[in-house]
């Protein structure tokens, strides 16, 4: 442990940047030739660290980056990242000045925002934007029937240049759901009906699920988030391409004590020892993103063995009844990730929580220090 960067940490998230590089490169290798890849690094890179994830994705071959919020894009620019950055939602009008300052490409779907964006242009240089069309997700976007008129309007604004047109799938991770092909068909019909008006536009619609399963929907660009981090959008897509989960959550046993049968542990006394045994306390709690609902339910790895989390998860700690096994203070505890021959996946944790792995990795809180493995000096910095 001497001098190891985790030596003085109770809990840390290890992010293997080599996994992100290889995931991006493998996904890119499966795309229809000519399709570019936009790595989605919103929400602190799905919890992995925005700037580090972005650099690794670029090193793996990402052409674009995508974020949800203007501040996320600004942070990438401030770190010296120079790739095109798409804002996946239209920013508030008051954020457009910052979007221009940081050379972000906003997605636009209202006339008001289009005019305000055009007004940010200076020195006769029009500002780029992508137009989003709603093909059935019904979150954001101009209706398909209004798309042509909207494009015409935008092209009449001297300060603005439309560079792309895109839409978003609602259920692409459900392999058998025909709604995805309906959306694909609608978008294709729209592009056809636009004819030459769509020429030169970057057309895109696929998230990770679309990128992995629908080559016909690759178009000019795919926007991959979750797969970048080594997690399949749904278990049904496991194996479509080899992905390596980049993030692990690790801690060390903080205390071990022997307790007698019948003793109850942690808040609410929701776990009672059925026989005398060794109880370990581990410094990871719901404030770190280990959801309280995993009390008496989730599992962790210690010395290569699985243990159920015993009793209530508290804000900063949880407990494990190790029975007759040997467990010592300082033993590594893997909450998410691999230890010896076993692995706790974000999917496993999500299944126990009735949620999706996206929420598990995004939920690892800011308090948890990220430790980066296999950082590479390379073009990702610029
Ligand atoms: C978050 C997001 C994505 C990435 O989705 P994944 O399922 O993580 O690949 C793609 N497009 C848009 C518009 C998004 O908001």
Image (tube, rainbow, N blue to C red):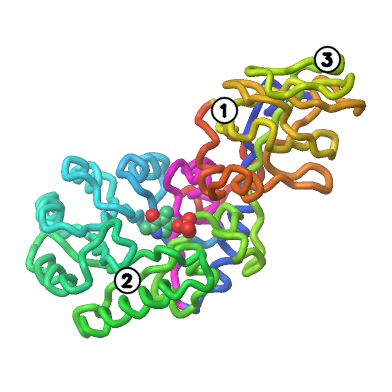
Query: Where residue 176 sits in the image (x, y, percent)?
Result: 52, 73
Query: Where residue 326 sits in the image (x, y, percent)?
Result: 91, 26
Q: Secondary structure at mark 1?
A: helix
Q: Eyeballing the image, is 381 above or below 154?
A: above
Left or right of 343? Residue 315 is left
Q: Over which residues does the magenta segment extend?
A: 34-59
Q: Quadrant of residue 128?
A: bottom left
Left or right of 119? Residue 362 is right
Between discs 3 and 1, the one toward the N terminus:
3
Between discs 1 and 2, the one toward the N terminus:
2
Q: Quadrant of residue 135?
A: bottom left
Q: Secondary structure at mark 3?
A: strand
One can see residue 10 in this view: no
To which residue does mark 3 refer?
Answer: 257
> Is the C-beta of the residue carrying label 2 under 8 Å from the nearest atom of ligand 1?
no
10 Å crowding of disc 3: few (<14), some (14-19), many (20+): few
View quadrant of ligand 1: bottom left
């Amino acid at each position: 442990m001497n001098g190891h960067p985790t030596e003085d940490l109770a809990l840390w998230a290890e992010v293997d940047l080599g996994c992100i590089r290889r995931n991006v490169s493998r996904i890119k290798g499966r795309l229809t030739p000519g399709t570019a890849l936009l790595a989605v690094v919103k929400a602190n890179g799905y919890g992995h660290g925005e700037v580090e994830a972005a650099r690794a994705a670029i090193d793996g071959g990402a052409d674009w980056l995508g974020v949800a919020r203007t501040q996320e894009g600004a942070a990438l620019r401030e770190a010296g990242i120079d790739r095109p950055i798409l804002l996946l939602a239209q920013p508030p009008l008051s954020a457009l000045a910052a979007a221009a300052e940081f050379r972000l490409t906003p997605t636009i779907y209202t006339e008001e925002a289009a005019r305000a964006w055009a007004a940010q242009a200076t020195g006769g240089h029009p500002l780029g934007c992508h137009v989003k069309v709603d093909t059935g997700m019904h979150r954001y976007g101009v209706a398909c029937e209004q798309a042509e008129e909207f494009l015409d309007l935008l092209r009449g604004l001297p300060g603005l240049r439309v560079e792309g047109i895109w839409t978003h799938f609602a259920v692409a991770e459900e392999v058998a759901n025909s709604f995805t092909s309906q959306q694909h068909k609608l978008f294709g019909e729209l592009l056809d009906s636009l004819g030459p008006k769509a020429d030169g536009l970057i057309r895109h619609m696929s998230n990770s699920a679309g990128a992995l399963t629908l080559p016909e929907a690759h178009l000019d660009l795919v926007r991959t988030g979750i797969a970048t981090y080594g997690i399949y959008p749904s278990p049904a897509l496991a194996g479509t391409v080899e992905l390596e989960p980049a993030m692990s959550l690790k801690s060390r046993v903080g205390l071990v004590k022997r307790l007698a049968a019948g003793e109850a542990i942690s808040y609410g006394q929701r776990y009672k020892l059925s026989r005398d045994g060794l109880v370990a306390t581990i410094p990871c709690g719901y404030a770190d993103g280990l959801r309280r609902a995993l009390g008496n339910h989730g599992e962790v790895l210690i010395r290569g063995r699985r243990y159920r989390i015993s009793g209530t998860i508290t804000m900063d700690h949880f407990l494990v009844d190790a029975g007759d096994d040997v467990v010592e203070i300082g033993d590594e505890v893997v909450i998410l990730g691999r230890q010896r021959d076993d692995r706790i996946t974000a999917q496993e944790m999500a299944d126990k929580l009735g949620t999706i792995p996206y929420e598990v990795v995004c939920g690892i809180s800011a308090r948890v220090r990220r430790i980066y493995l296999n950082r590479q000096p390379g073009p990702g910095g610029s």
